[in-house]
Image (cartoon, rainbow, N blue to C red):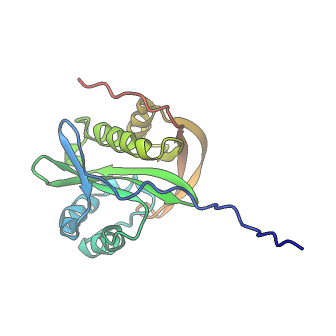
Amino acid sequence: MSTIALQRPDTRPMMPGPAPDISTARLTLRPHRLSDAPAIAESLSDFAVTRMLSRVPAPFDRQDALDWLMPVTSGTLPDWSLAITGKDDVHIGTVSIELRHGRWHLGYWLNRYYWRRGYMSEAVAAIIERFSRRMPETPIHSGVFADNPASLRLQEKLGFRMTGCGEIYCFARNTMVSHIETVLQPGALKPRKVA
């Protein structure tokens, strides 16, 4: 009589490895540090920013920033959560690709005083390009609130396509908000045009 070894298929998602430092023409994307807490608190205490984020409460303070930074800086999460900084290393925002419910999700925010300069397009394109090199067959999911057309335009310019609509809870607004779901399929990233 022979013995047959039964093995379960490995269903764990592939991991991209540690988050890198990424330099672009104007920005440096780097892993967060605990010392970023004051800058994060300052940016996210602005309701104009937090109202477009589903999981950020309002008001938001330094302790909230530290509570978020502790697991992010611990090195135990598979996520890439990078600080967006100028060449002077001043924290102006965050761009991340997080593993949620077995799918990779793009998220981002930028301090209001840096809006309309193309920084977010530059940062999002850079993190997706690097992530796609490590995870070439992986779709990247995202989404925007329906009242955030600038963010939807950013995603569409990079190759994201709408996949559905629904409602999700926004902590800062304390209500359900219409949400447009998007996805970037492998190989669909459009090159960013530099002005």
Given residues 68 and 192, the one toward you in this image is 192
> Which quarter of the figure is the N terminus placed in?
bottom right
Q: Residue furthest right?
A: 1
**Quarter of image, res 150:** top left
Residue 70 vs 9, above or below: the answer is: below
Spot occupied by residue 131 in the image (x, y as percentages of width and height): 40, 46
**Quarter of image, res 161:** top right
Residue 79 vs 2, above or below: the answer is: above
Residue 142 vs 121, above or below: the answer is: below
Q: Which residue lies furthest to the front in this view?
A: 1
Residue 99 vs 35, above or below: the answer is: above
Spot occupied by residue 174 in the image (x, y as percentages of width and height): 47, 64
Q: Residue at x 31, y 57 (%)?
A: 47
Spot occupied by residue 33 in the image (x, y as percentages of width and height): 23, 66
**Quarter of image, res 4:** bottom right
Given residues 9 and 75, the one toward you in this image is 9
Question: Does residue 111 appear left or right of residue 175 in this picture?
Answer: left
Q: Residue at x 71, y 66 (%)?
A: 8
Q: How many labels does the image show?
A: 0
Question: Does residue 87 appear left or right of residue 67 in this picture?
Answer: left
Given residues 175 and 138, the one toward you in this image is 138
Given residues 182 and 150, the one toward you in this image is 182
> Which quarter of the figure is the C terminus placed in?
top left
